[in-house]
Amino acid sequence: MNAIVNLARETLSTPFLHQGRVLGVGMDCIGVAVYVAKRLGLDHTESQGYSPSPSNGLLESALGAQSCLFEVRDMQVGDLLLMRFSEEPQHVAIFAGDTIIHSYQNVGKVIEHPFSDVWRARVVKIYRFKL
């Protein structure tokens, strides 16, 4: 799954932009996953779930359309990590081994940083691209 991580790394430093999908211009967390899916040749369409609000299961629906659900204990490099900050899961990162890659609003861009215990505790579900 190094190909997934390498593709995700292409998005590093792209500014955070809610609903953004354009490399170098702006991406949100799902924008990174959409970019990777498209570069992998997966048939991703925005109509399969993600809306301006990731609530009410819409984010999970979008992930399920292009990936398979796995147990957290079975996490592998290249997996999509569905995370919760407060109530509902509303954030996605790509697992890169000792690090994660994601567009993070608090930092204002796509970043890669250590997958610390704080981030690990936020993971609710794991999805894997259907390759």
Image (cartoon, grey):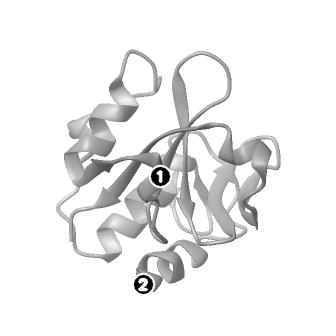
Query: Which residue is the site of mark 1?
Result: 73
Instruction: Please state which of residues 10 and 85 is positioned toward the viewer in this rendering.
Output: 85
Nearest-to-viewer mark from 1 and 2: 1
Residue 12 coordinates in the image, percent (x, y): 67, 71
Q: Quadrant of residue 110?
A: bottom right
Q: Residue at x 30, y 39 (%)?
A: 62
Looking at the image, residue 32 lies above or below residue 47: below
Q: Nearer the viewer, residue 68 or 42?
A: 68
Tell which circle, 1 or 2, labels the residue nearer the N-terminal end: 2
Q: Give the image location of residue 102, x and y in percent.
A: 62, 56
Locate residue 3 relative to residue 10 in the image: left or right.
left
> Left or right: 39 with respect to 41?
right
The amino acid sitting under disc 2 is Ala
Q: Which residue is at the front of the view, 23 or 91?
A: 91
Residue 3, which numbered label? Answer: 2
Instruction: Give how far apart the Cα atoms at labels 1 and 2 are.
Output: 22 Å
SS state under label 2: helix
Residue 50 visible to the viewer: no
Residue that appears at 81% across and 41% down: 106
Please say if the residues under marks 1 and 2 sit with CB atoms less than 8 Å apart.
no
User: At 58% from the left edge and 39% from the top edge, which residue is drawn?
Assistant: 18
Residue type beneath disc 1: Arg
Query: Residue extending furthest front?
Result: 73
In the picture shown, does residue 105 fall above or below 127? above
Give the image location of residue 17, x and y in percent. 63, 45
Q: Residues within 10 Å of mark 2 (few under 14, many from 20)?
A: few
Rendered-image quadrant of the N terminus: bottom left
